[in-house]
Structure formats: structure tokens, C-alpha cells
Image (cartoon, rainbow, N blue to C red):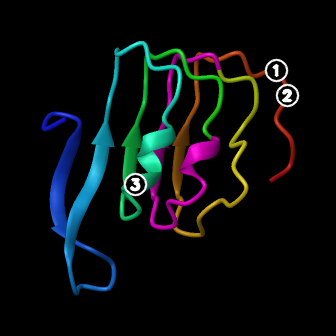
Amino acid sequence: MKKILQSFGKTSSGETYAFLEFICTHKKLRSIKTIQNYQHLQKVDLSYNNLTSLKYLSGLKYLTSIIAINNQLTSVLDMKYIPQSLDFVDLSQNQITKIPSL
């Protein structure tokens, strides 16, 4: 887990510290349900896995970057809530055939 959770820093409120980056590539992941436990993450890299959904990123309201290159995703950001702070997304090399208006 030490190599996956990175960049330990102050949360957006500045009152506590938390892990800010989750980098988990080439692990054959099929689910990221437990990522919800790290609510202060700002950057997530899930490239080269077997993910079919990013819905569990919905509760991460401080996300600025999502990288999920080369997975099995068929839709763009299938999250209930897309953070306002999100400014970079790379979903290249997936199974996405249609991009709806966001």
C-alpha cells in the first residue's frame, strides 16, 4: 500500500493531513470500491488495469486528476458526482465508443 498511496499532505481545509495521490497501475484491478475510504485524494492513476467503472470515485470531492488509461471502461465518468475541482481526465485506450455531453 505504501507505493500506492503517495503524497502525504494537508487536506483542503488545512486542518489535518491525508494521502493526496493514489497510483495503482498494472495491477489487474477489477474494482476500486475501497478507494472511497480516502476522501481527500486529489490525483488518481488507475492505468493498465481491468476496470469497467469509475463509479467509486464519486465521493472524492477534491479530485483534480483522473488517469485510467487502458482499462475496460465503456462510458465516460460514470460517477454520480463529478467534482468541480476536476481539471484533467485521461481515459484513452479504453472501450469508449460514445462521449455524452457532460
Secondary structure at badge 3 equals helix
Seen from the viewer's position, the closer of residues 80 and 93 is 80
The residues bearing labels 1 and 2 have C-alpha atoms spaced at a distance of: 4 Å
Q: Residues within 10 Å of mark 1 (few under 14, many from 20)?
A: few
Give the labeled residue for mark 1: 97
Which label sits on residue 98? 2
Give the labeled residue for mark 3: 37
- What are the residue bounds of the magenta stretch? 55-72
Give the main secondary structure, helix, strand or loop, of the magenta stretch: loop
Tell me which label, 1 or 3, sits earlier in the chain: 3
Q: Nearer the viewer, mark 3 or mark 2?
A: 3
- Badge 2 amino acid: Lys
- Occupied quadrant, residue 54: top right
Q: Residues within 10 Å of mark 3 (few under 14, many from 20)?
A: few
- Badge 1 amino acid: Thr
> Residue 31: image x %, image y %?
52, 28
Seen from the viewer's position, the closer of residues 76 and 28 is 28
